[in-house]
Amino acid sequence: MSTKLLIIGAGVVGLAAAYIARSAGLSVTVLERHPLACGASVRNFGMLWPIGQPTGPLHDLAIRSRALWQHAAETTGLWLNPCGSLHLAHHEDEQAVLEEFIAQSPARSLSLLTADQVREITPAAASRLGPVRLRAGLHSTTEAAVNPRTASAHLAQWLAAQPNVSIQFNALVREVSDSHAITARGERHDFDFCLICGGADITTLYPDFLSTHTLRLCKLHMLATPPNQAPRIGPHLASGLTLRHYRNFEICKSHAALRRRIATQTPELDRYGIHVMASQDDAGRIILGDSHEYDHNITPFDNALIDELMLRELQLVFNLPSWDIAQRWHGIYAKHPSLAYVHAPQSPRVHALTGLGGAGMTLSFGAAEQTLLNAGIIGEVFGL
């Protein structure tokens, strides 16, 4: 008889775990409190973003996760676009960071492009930042796009059609013991092992989990243009502001000067953690963002100034087919100050996986596989 795995949470992390466990021959049940995933898994750029992880184990994990995403896309028919990414440099210190990063990252698939070469790759790179011209672009080939609005639903639908897999929505779990879970409707689900992938909602089962594991909550604002199939913008796009957001760039000596300039010239961006990026889904919708507010600064009410500041910075560096904004939203995720994710045993047979922060899409498959391996629930499955 195969091992019975219960997964709580049908966001991208829970479904990644279900995909991997099913491939390992386990019997899998997934319980989700909502009719469909509606948290951080659908409120993001849809970026698979290895470029954002520091060289070493975390970048290796991101590359592994990217390969598993590709495997899942080829197996299930999920839309995945291997679009790559471009970081644009409009200032001397931004170009210096990009040059240093390439020099210190020889194992990565990177190239430094001239402004003309950038414009050959994408029509969406603005040639000037006000009076400042586009200087260069860091091109990486490892990034990919999925549609965050449909990816989780697609995976869930495909998994539900497989033998020995059950995906149950509107199933709020109110209690977990070391052998079974009880839903709000009183249904009992026995298991050999339980993996809780509830994101920030893990406090429903474990109210003190965030504080116990030093997790912070982060709220981000995002925007989207209407769907439009043409023209395509090409790779994921990031401005020089993004170089101060991802810790992988901190290895560069020029990084401190870049941070000081931004803090001095535009302190309002640091106040709200704003850096600007753009990605495009299969419907042609361009997803734009984002911002970062933490802990006690998070409220149910969205600050219109944040959207205005994001749009101001976006319009300086990107040329989009249209600046019509069809949708605005916010998301909230849990983030650890130093760990890529938190794998926390609650009992010998009940483990939690959460705290992937803003790298949830990027690391989901890799973190799920690593967690199941480390827990001894599966052995090596994919020869990728």
Image: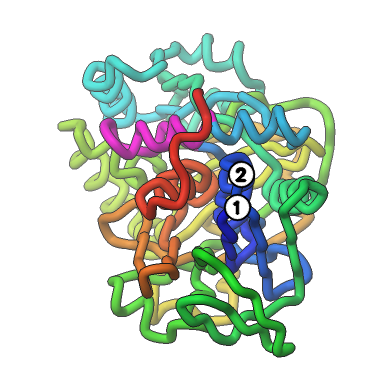
In the image, taking residue 375 as reference, residue 323 lies left or right, namely right
Closer to the camera in the image, 262 or 350: 350
129 falls in the magenta region:
no
Nearer to us of marks 2 and 1 is 1
Counting residues from the N terminus, which is met first, the one under dot 2 or under dot 1? 1
In this view, the residue farthest toward the left is 253
Q: Which residue is mark 1?
A: 2
Above or below, 91 relative to 334: above
Q: Residues within 10 Å of mark 1 (few under 14, many from 20)?
A: few
In space, the residues marked 2 and 1 are separated at their CA atoms by 7 Å
Residue beneath the point at 52% across and 57% down: 309
Residue 55 visible, this angle = yes
Residue beneath the point at 84% across and 31% down: 229
Q: Where is residue 187 shown, x and y percent of the image?
A: 71, 83
In the image, taking residue 193 as reference, residue 213 lies left or right, namely left
Which residues make up the magenta segment?
49-67
